[in-house]
Image: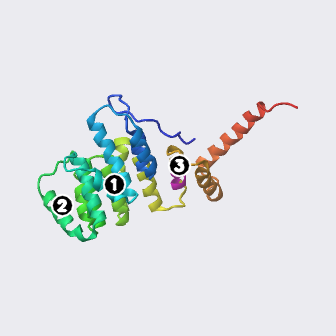
């Protein structure tokens, strides 16, 4: 059976991630939901507020609302937010892109604060948009966050380096196999191998439930499995459970 959609993740200290819903919505591409969650969540520290704003403004960028980001992130804002603003400037002004990349090159040539994951992600995004995947990968390799690894997987797959993408995915799985980003990266790699492979379809069934997708999405993948791989152990076990459910349901059917 596929696992239910995840609840708020906990860190090693047992503390619940206050931004779980904000991050999860962003990772699965539900940008308006991310914005809505970010605007109503109550946080316990200024550091968490900065982290929330990073995801909020990245969601606005994904919606191409560059003006919102440029208007609201001020020169006095945190370094993480300045990194998001730089990416917004790059996206919003084609005429300034060469200058922005040159400035970024100079910054990357100096000592970079590798604890600023947002800076590494935004630098990589700028380089990748600028058709320089090697520079993007160099930026990402300085970080050890799941998000840096997930972006690395995406770039490697676009470069047709499935072998290296698998190695990066293994690092993600070793760090946190159940994380949404790891589940997504697993699906990307499996799709790159063969979108009709039974293990890929099984993974997509699990992932669609893990992310709380609509039932018809899960049913679509199950139908593909039943049609093309009816003897796969997952389907055989699924059908056994279906029959068991039907048998139990009959016991509770009202008698005439």
Q: Which mark is residue 104?
A: 2
Residue at 24 percent of width and 48 percent of height: 80
Looking at the image, residue 87 sits to the left or right of residue 181; the answer is left
Q: Position of residue 85 (x, y in %)?
A: 26, 55
Q: Position of residue 244 (x, y in %)?
A: 70, 37
Looking at the image, residue 200 sits to the left or right of residue 26; the answer is right
**Which marked residue is nearer to the observer: mark 2 or mark 1?**
1
**Which marked residue is nearer to the observer: mark 1 or mark 3?**
1
Secondary structure that dominates the magenta span: helix
What colour-coding does the image apply?
rainbow
Quadrant (top left/top right/bottom left/bottom right) for the C terminus: top right
As drawn, which residue projects farthest toward the left? 110
Q: In the depicted view, which residue is nearer to us: 96 or 5?
A: 96
Query: Does residue 143 appear in the picture of this structure?
Result: no
Question: Between disc 2 and disc 1, whose residue precedes?
Answer: 1
In magenta, the rendered stretch is 199-205
Crowding at dot 3, Cα within 10 Å, few <14 / some 14-19 / many 20+, comes out as: many
Question: Between disc 2 and disc 3, whose residue precedes?
Answer: 2
């Amino acid at each position: 059976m596929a696992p239910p959609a995840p609840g708020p993740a906990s860190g090693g200290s047992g503390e619940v991630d206050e931004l779980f819903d904000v991050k999860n919505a962003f990772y699965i591409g539900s940008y308006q939901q991310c914005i809505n969650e970010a605007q109503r969540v109550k946080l316990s520290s200024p550091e968490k507020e900065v982290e929330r704003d990073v995801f909020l403004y990245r969601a606005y960028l994904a919606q191409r609302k560059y003006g919102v980001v440029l208007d609201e992130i001020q020169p006095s804002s945190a370094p993480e937010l300045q990194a998001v603003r730089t990416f917004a400037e790059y996206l919003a002004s084609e005429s300034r892109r060469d200058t922005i990349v040159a400035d970024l090159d100079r910054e990357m040539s100096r000592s970079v604060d590798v604890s600023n994951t947002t800076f590494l992600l935004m630098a990589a995004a700028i380089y990748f948009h600028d058709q320089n995947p090697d520079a993007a990968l160099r930026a990402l390799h300085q970080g050890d966050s799941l998000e840096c690894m997930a972006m690395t997987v995406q770039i490697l797959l676009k470069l047709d380096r499935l072998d290296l993408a698998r190695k990066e995915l293994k690092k993600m799985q070793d760090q946190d196999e159940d994380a949404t980003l790891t589940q997504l990266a697993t699906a990307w790699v499996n799709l790159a191998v063969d979108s009709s492979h039974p293990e890929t379809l099984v993974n997509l069934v699990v992932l669609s439930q893990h992310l709380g997708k609509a039932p018809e999405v899960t049913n679509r993948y199950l139908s593909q499995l039943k049609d093309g791989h009816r003897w796969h152990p997952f389907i055989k076990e699924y059908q056994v459970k279906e029959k068991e459910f039907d048998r139990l349901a009959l016991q509770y059917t009202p008698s005439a």
